[in-house]
Image (cartoon, coloured by chain):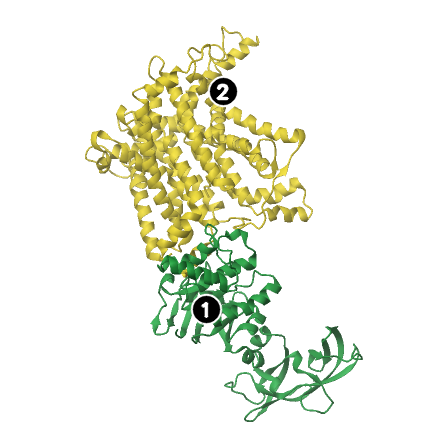
Chain colours: A yellow, B green
Amino acid sequence: MDRRTAWILCAAVGLLLAVGFLYPAFCVLREAFIDPRDGGFTFGYVLAVLRDPLYRDGLINALLLGLASTLVAALLALPLALVNHRYSFPGRGFLALALLVPMILPPFVGAIGIKCILGTEGSFNAVLAGLGWMDPLHPRDWMAENRLLGIVVMNALHLYPILYLNLAAALAQMDPAMEQAAANLGCSPWRRLTRVTLPIITPGLFAGGALVFIWAFTELGVPLVFDFPRVAPVQILDGIKNLDRNPLPYALTTIVLVVAGGVFLASKLLFGSGRHGAAPRPSLRSAPQPLNGWLGWACSGLFAGVTALACLPHLGVILMSVSGHWHNSVLPAELTLAHWQEALGSALVVPSIQNSLSYAGLATAVALVMGIAAAWVIARSDLRIRHLLDTLTMLPLAVPGLVLAFGYLSLSQEGKPFAILVGAGGSPLLLLGLAYAVRRLPYVTRAAVAGLQQCDPVLEQAARSMGASAWSTLRRISLPLLAAHLAAGGVLAFAFSMLEVSDSLILAQRAEHFPITKATFALMSALGDGPQLAAALGVWSMAFLSVALIGASLLNGKRGGLSGE
Amino acid sequence: METLSIRSVRKTFPTPTGPLTVLDDVNLTIAPGELFFLLGPSGCGKTTLLRCLAGLDFPTAGAIFFGDRDVTDLAPHFRETAMVFQSYALWPHLSVSENIAFGLVERKVPSEERDRRVLEALASVRLDGLGDRSIDQLSGGQQQRVALARALVVRPRCLLLDEPLSNLDAQLRVEMRQEIRRIVKENGLTAVYVTHDQEEALAMADRMAILSRGRIAQVGTPEEVYRRPVTSEVARFIGETNLLAAEMSGQDAATISVHTAAGVFTGILGDPSHQTVAGQFTELSVRPEAWRPAAVGEPNTLTGIVVEKVYLGQRAQLTLRTELGLLRIVIINPPGDLTTGHELTVSVATSDVVVLPRK
């Protein structure tokens, strides 16, 4: 690619990131360092946060939650990925896809479900009471008793698919000859795992681990549902809700950002460059070894068990959506499909689906164009700045959605730069399109970079040598070869845009502009059968997103993954 | 068609430890219709030079001309070259015919003519009837032919081949050599062919350039390069040779005489422009097959004990221990009594003793 084109593409992506990401983030951070009295620069607020025992507790708790969630997610994902890579067992294809199901529900919706199951009046207590192991008059509140543990388990069950996908991608990229060579030299299966396989997939493990850590570290919905306020993201939300311009929440945000960004950069620096043992064109396909008898069924059981556990919240939501009355019983006392129909008839629901489709559609289109441009510069140009661009496009993963959403909100007020993005009647189409696009750019960029890296540049050079211009080469050679990767990245971006919580809650102000998530949130707090309607809407979006994710997974084949490296 | 000239081309790549020079002051002129070889060991810069001709890399300094046109900084798709890649680089999402038609589509050739030329190209590489196949349904040899057809069909100004045969098995490689040469000559193409296989170069080239560490060591016809290498490096790289230590003694118009530990030898200079001084240390390059059994006392003779014999039917490879060290010779139709331990005297013609500057 000639350098001029590379610079133009680089500038375009840079502009999008500068406007949609760096500037709003900077505006939020500025509050943390500017003394409102004299407008001078100060470290005082950051120091004050670190000295404040409440905030310090919040940070420590967030770190603990992040680390523990990542560890538990890794303990779940690693054996699953290894087993799926190495063995075939009954129902392997379906079970491997089903593992991804937990991703289809925003945790706060899942929270309705988990309350139905673990709450004082939930199914679990009803089971215990039915067995005579608990006094029904003095039920235990499971969610209140082990809050930290509960949050960790919820996070891990929601996030392990990210790690699983990364590990699966790393394993699929590994040249099977690596393991075969070790076996040939007399290495036992277990030592092959520790001496060859694990070291080779370590970059994948850390790339996925960093994403999971950042997600859990900045997770807002789950601690809120577990009613656990002493954790940094909740403290930020509470602080920002107060409009008295207290700078401490901003300073806390800054610290969260620095930690998240630091972990992300560290994982990139330590493991980003080396793609050990990757075979661009593996000479051998690794055929999984069939497991017969009880061993095979044990593997099926492992996959089904993890999926079932992770799907408890979803199950709760589904039951909720079909229940007429549900208290102190294992299953709802009455079943009805009325809520599903009512939900589709509600004034909030159908427009919210239309809104979400248009916001997410716009965002996906922007993210695809920009993601391809960025990937092209990263994977194919020799500009020094491509490394910076690579880091910059991934950085939105390291920034809590809440921070950016708040930046957008303050920038879109009357007279501020983003006011021009607010459409007629206060439509947040452009604002949300931009916000979604920036935060989903990493998925598309990663998918496109992975595709380009797997596609030998010589195929493009051959086209150039046959007289094709750069544009023609992109259109006739690269895009068709990348199609599966781009479709997969695009579907992920679209699905995650449909699920987006923070931007949607904060930026869509009027009911007629609500996207699905905000409509769900509004229904949840409505009186009457609101929660059931919310659950029904949740079921509709789960169904929709399952189809989208399964499609993406099929398109991507085994090479998928939210590979963060 | 036009002359292709490479003028003082230099190419450096940035590395963490400073710039790495891959090509250094390379000058070459390739005549129209010539099948020209770039030959050298791995890492000598031959592929980089080829990529500079294709426009896939650009020289750090120097210029490349196609005829009178300076193409040094021209983008690859304006050069009208066509390259055959070592890995073939066939596009997996296109059929055989679509791969071949690609360049014609770029050149906006009308579809009727395009179809006709694709069929012709398929026929010329003997792949008639396989146009609808997908790439992964072809064997390695067939894929190689598709890559060749794809490059030929656009009638390039210059055909560039980057080790096109290195992924084929030995027998197919030998067959394809003559096939490629036939196609290039039948189409009257100028072609630049990169390889590290000296036999391929000797068998196919009109002329060749030997590259060594980014510089051109020698340019000439296969016979010139084989019979009259200009440095011991070239002598060693092309074919097998014996390098013998010597000291310059005298020179007349055509021949040169040198002292060795085994007496006086007369030979010729590898590089006629080379200035010689009596007493200067030199090296002699004598090919194994240039020696023949002789009587003691003839000029240019050497006597030794046979220490190893490899019998190969029509010939035998012998190793002699002589006063000049171990000597490898090849004897055609070897007599049966020539066994290890025998003493043997061999001689060599003056024109087969190449005197080289000593490194």
Percent across and percent down for residue A71 are 52, 32
Q: How many marks?
A: 2
Percent across and percent down for residue A360 are 34, 34
Furthest toward the bottom, the residue is B252
State the SS at label 1. strand
Q: Residue at x 31, y 49 (%)?
A: A11
Asked if residue B329 lies left or right of residue A303, the reply is right
> How far separated are the C-alphas under marks 1 and 2?
68 Å
Looking at the image, is mark 1 or mark 2 nearer the viewer? 1
- Tell me the quarter of the picture where residue A359 sits: top left
Residue topped by disc 2: A146
Percent across and percent down for residue B134 are 50, 51
Furthest toward the left, the residue is A415
- Tell me the quarter of the picture where residue A253 sits: top left
Label 2 crowding class (10 Å Cα cut-off): few <14, some 14-19, many 20+? few
B217 above or below A511? below
Q: Residue at x 63, y 77 (%)?
A: B241
The subunit carrying tag 1 is B
Q: Amino acid at mark 2?
A: Asn
Query: As rendered, which of B2 and B260 lies closer to the eye?
Result: B2
Q: Amino acid at mark 1?
A: Leu
Screen quadrant of the N terminus of chain A = bottom left
Query: As rendered, which of A336 and A523 lies closer to the eye?
Result: A336
A392 above or below A68? below
Residue B23 marker: 1
B105 above or below A305? below
State the SS at label 2. loop
Asked if residue B49 lies left or right of residue B291, the reply is left
Query: As rendered, which of A460 and B285 lies closer to the eye?
Result: A460
Asked if residue A411 lies left or right of residue A118, the reply is left
Residue A489 marker: none
